[in-house]
Structure formats: structure tokens, C-alpha cells
Image (cartoon, rainbow, N blue to C red):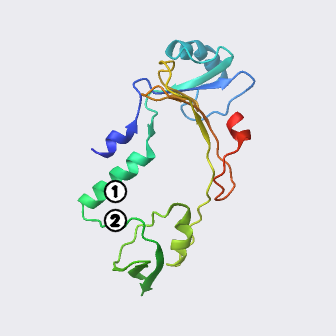
């Protein structure tokens, strides 16, 4: 029940318009043909007036939604603790002792923990911890930048492609994903594009 609160499915779901310069669309299950999309743009504009009249077409999905990852993570941690898990925050793992193919102990910078279960939630450091037990789990960090406005009057009723208006009125204008390793710098080029 706690996790259900983290799911953000707006009453009218998500619309994904297609720019006019696109000549054709790949056909995926649930996607419309180009001719159906041409006629759908007026329907999309009826559902969401913020869709540009320059859009050729698109689709909308009544069950599409999103999850607030931070709130979901906290809810999962609370539920895991309620079910008996012990969570050690800010405990750097230095070594994992394995015997006969089974985890026996986790050594952190401040304690030794006897356990047969280890949940690796180290984010971009998952590969380093996985190597300690003989697993190769590649994780590739990406830098994401986004632009959010100050609170505005209601202009959008649902998510439109990468654009979304939050309940507090702020509008998410765009996001980026860049393969730059652990570089967390902000670039004006990405913000202005």
C-alpha cells in the first residue's frame, strides 16, 4: 500500500506527440499507423490543448504513469525494515567474505556483519561490490540535467512526451542523459537545448 502512493498515474495519463518532420513511425504493439496518427492529433489537442498544432500525430496511453524514485526507495526501505531487514546507511562496504559459494560476512568501515543475504544498493558502485562476490554486474552512470520552471498556473493536464507539470505548478521542460561517467558538472549547452 505504501508503494502504491508513489505511483503517479494522472487521471488522463500520458500523451506523446510526434513532430511534424517525422515521416513515418515504427510500428510497435499499441502504436497507431501514420494515417491513424494524423487523425489523432486533433483528438490529442482536444485532450491536451498544450500540444502544438505543428505536431503531426502521436499516441496516448490511459494507463501510462510514473514513479517518484526517491519516495519509492524510501517506501521500499520502510517495508523491508517492517519485514525484518536491517538497513545500514552510509556504511561503506570494504569486503564481502564468501565461503563455499555463500556470503558469510560483510565488512564495512565501522563493523562486521554476519549474514547470508546482501542487497547491493550501491548505485554506480554496484560493480565494485559485486566483484567482491565474483559477479560482473556492469552499471554505467549517466549525467542527467533537467530544467524546471517556477510554479505556473495550470497549463498542462497530463505528461506530454518529456514535458510535465507538477501539482505545485512547476513545469519540467526537458531532461538529458549524457554518458560522461561520474562527471556531475552542469553544462549550459544541455540546459539551453
Which residue is painted at 54% across and 31% down in the image? 30
Whole-number angstrom distance, CA of label 2 to CA of label 1: 8 Å
Which residue is painted at 40% across and 78% down in the image? 110
Which element is circle 1 on?
Answer: helix
The reply to whether residue 193 is in sight is no
Q: Quadrant of residue 192?
A: top right
Residue 138, above or below 64: below
How far across and how far down the image is residue 92, in percent?
46, 72
Relative horizontal placement of residue 43, taking residue 52 as reference (left or right): left
- Res. 87 mark: 2
* Residue marked by disc 1: 77
The C terminus lies in which quarter of the figure? top right
- Res. 170 mark: none
Residue 144, above or below 138: above
Residue farthest to the front, as pictured: 150
The residue nearer to you, when weighing 151 against 93, is: 151
Callout count = 2
Which residue is painted at 43% across and 23% down in the image? 12
The residue nearer to you, when weighing 76 against 180, is: 180
How far across and how far down the image is residue 31, in percent?
58, 29
The N terminus lies in which quarter of the figure? top left
How far across and how far down the image is residue 180, in percent?
69, 55
Disc 1 crowd, CA 10 A, few/some/many (<14, 14-19, 20+): some
- Is label 2 in contact with label 1 (beta carbons under 8 Å)? yes
Which element is circle 2 on?
Answer: loop
How far across and how far down the image is residue 19, in percent?
69, 24
The residue nearer to you, when weighing 146 against 177, is: 146
Relative horizontal placement of residue 86, taking residue 99 as reference (left or right): left
Amino acid at each position: 500500500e505504501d508503494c502504491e502512493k508513489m505511483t503517479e498515474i494522472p487521471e488522463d495519463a500520458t500523451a506523446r506527440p510526434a513532430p511534424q518532420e517525422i515521416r513515418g513511425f515504427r510500428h510497435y504493439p499499441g502504436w497507431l499507423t501514420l494515417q491513424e496518427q494524423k487523425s489523432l492529433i486533433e483528438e490529442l489537442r482536444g485532450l491536451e490543448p498544450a500540444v502544438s498544432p505543428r505536431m503531426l500525430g502521436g499516441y496516448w496511453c490511459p494507463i501510462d504513469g510514473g514513479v517518484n524514485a526517491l519516495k519509492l526507495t524510501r517506501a521500499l526501505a520502510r517495508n523491508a525494515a517492517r519485514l525484518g531487514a536491517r538497513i545500514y546507511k552510509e556504511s561503506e562496504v570494504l569486503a564481502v567474505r564468501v565461503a563455499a559459494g555463500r556470503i558469510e560476512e560483510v565488512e564495512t568501515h565501522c563493523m562486521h556483519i554476519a549474514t547470508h543475504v546482501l542487497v547491493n544498493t550501491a548505485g554506480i558502485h554496484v560493480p565494485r561490490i559485486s566483484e567482491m562476490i565474483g559477479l560482473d554486474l556492469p552499471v554505467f552512470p549517466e549525467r542527467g540535467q533537467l530544467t524546471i520552471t517556477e510554479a505556473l498556473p495550470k497549463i498542462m493536464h497530463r505528461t506530454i512526451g518529456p514535458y510535465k507539470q507538477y501539482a505545485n505548478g512547476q513545469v519540467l521542460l526537458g531532461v538529458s542523459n549524457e554518458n560522461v561517467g561520474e562527471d556531475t558538472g552542469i553544462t549550459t549547452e544541455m540546459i539551453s537545448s
